[in-house]
Image (cartoon, rainbow, N blue to C red):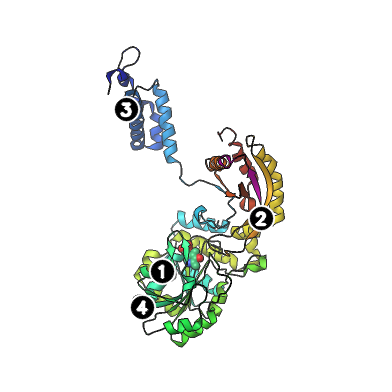
Amino acid sequence: MRKSEQHDRNGADTRRDLPSVDAVLKSCGDLEATWGRTRVVLVVKSELAHLRTRLGQGLPCDISKNEIVARVLTALTDADRSTFKRIFNLTGTILHTNLGRALLPRRAIDAMNQVASMPTNLEYDLQSGTRGERDDHAEQLICELLGTEAATVVNNNAAALLLVLNTLAQGLEIPVSRGELVEIGGSFRIPDIMEKSGCKLVEVGTTNRTHLKDYLSAVKNSTALILKVHTSNYSIEGFTSAVGEPDLATLAHEHNLPLVVDLGSGNLIDFSCYGLPEEPVITSAIRNGADIVTFSGDKLLGGPQSGIIAGRRDLIDRIRSNPLRRALRSDKLTLAALSEVLKIYRKPETLARELPTLQYLTKEQSLIREQAVFLAPQLAGCLPDGFTVEPQPCLSQIGSGAMPVQNIPSYALAITAITDADLRRLSEAMRRLPCPVIGRLHEGKLLLDLRCLDDDEKFIEQARHLEPLSL
Ligand SMILES: *Cc1c(COP(=O)(O)O)cnc(C)c1O
């Protein structure tokens, strides 16, 4: 380090002018009460180290003790802020896996609050005073709604499938149609899950066509079960054929094998009565002869992240006694929320009112259009010259692999700019807002699909922060 850098105009060593840690701490009296001494000392040291480095580099560093204390407070507050931000999901994908999927109904949130803050009989039988079973809270409800004998709940649907296959098929073979070897995104692929479950995948049929005789020729003594996977996030069209659940069930049962159906999202009730595209209804898979079904709790069901396994009592008993289940089971918050969501399904008439997912799915396009017409000039007023905002029809997606092909007519604020780079800068600026706004770039426009926007005021308040940003 060059000597001149350590001296100010008067030749004094400026680094020695920085107060000592103790001196700053003395001025931090109030902070310690709130943040604790350990944390304050750490941050004071790091601030002083930062200032010392600046001085060492010959950078100007004229700072009072009070200013240092103010910087310490800012650093303490910044570091303490949650990494979870409230965002506006205007992507047009309602159940967006990266944005947290389903929002919970009020009563589910209340139930989570209660079990989080007070002791509860999670696994305690109040009648006998002995150990209970955590599944008791949701199992009855699942069985009532699905008409199954038994059910258990784990961390997510990937865990559900892993647990089912490991319990029923470890060391054995499972025939699966080549048309159903799906990748769900992230790291979920059917062949990988099967390998990790310790079972052997036997591919049958072809990508576009699989027949009953393909399954028949694959069934051997070493076959554990037949697996059908709902191809949630794509559809094969044209010259296709797949074997339906009833035929697969007959084949499986003739060979004394269970039929397992991974429904992915699944509908607890038929949402087509709300004018929504068709998605497999879980009860029909069971009526069609599935012995075990698995599906997600936070997709169309509209509940917390969880995987539900339902079906034959003898199979569920085996699944429940697998040691892996202990590793994959759901916690009390999830079970409390899931139970409340399931109770709403008992009163289907109230679903569209009580379940946020269904509210978003069924929001009328005409209402969204009105919202777009109302908000377009207000948003335009928040943007610099060169950007235009127009209401524009668009299509929302359900997301999370449900109803992959059919979309739902919606309305967006369509933003255009002079160059694509401007548009990208705007979408970056929107992601930097205190409550980030996430849209999607589509055909040279930034689309903000308003289907999931239910706080117009807050949205515009955010947009006002855009002005001072350099776009
Ligand atoms: C979404 C999905 C899964 C994975 O479910 P998670 O709850 O995300 O773990 C598995 N199978 C199918 C068919 C799916 O659609």
Which residue occupies the extreme bottom position in the image? 254
Q: Helix, strand, or loop for circle 3? A: helix
**Left or right relative to 174: residue 15:** left
Q: What residue type is labelled 2?
A: Ser
Pair 3/4: label in front: 4
Query: Does the beta carbon of the residue at mark 1 sit less than 8 Å from ligand 1?
Result: no
Pair 1/2: label in front: 1
Q: How far apart are marks 4 and 2 (CA)?
A: 48 Å
Picture coordinates of residue 284, whole percent (x, y): 57, 76
First-in-chain label (3 vs 1): 3
Q: Which amino acid does label 1 sit on?
A: Pro
Pair 1/4: label in front: 1
- The residue that mark 3 highlights is 21
How crowded pointer 1 is (Cα within 10 Å; few <14, some 14-19, many 20+) is rated as: some
Residue 102 is tagged as none
On screen, residue 153 above or below 23:
below
First-in-chain label (1 vs 2): 1
- The residue that mark 4 highlights is 172
Q: Helix, strand, or loop for circle 4? A: loop
**Left or right relative to 24: residue 272:** right
Residue positioned 67% across, 68% down in the render:
273
Residue numbers of the magenta segment: 412-422
How crowded pointer 3 is (Cα within 10 Å; few <14, some 14-19, many 20+) is rated as: some
Q: Is residue 108 at all visible to an observer of this figure? A: yes
- The residue that mark 2 highlights is 410
First-in-chain label (1 vs 4): 4
How crowded pointer 4 is (Cα within 10 Å; few <14, some 14-19, many 20+) is rated as: some
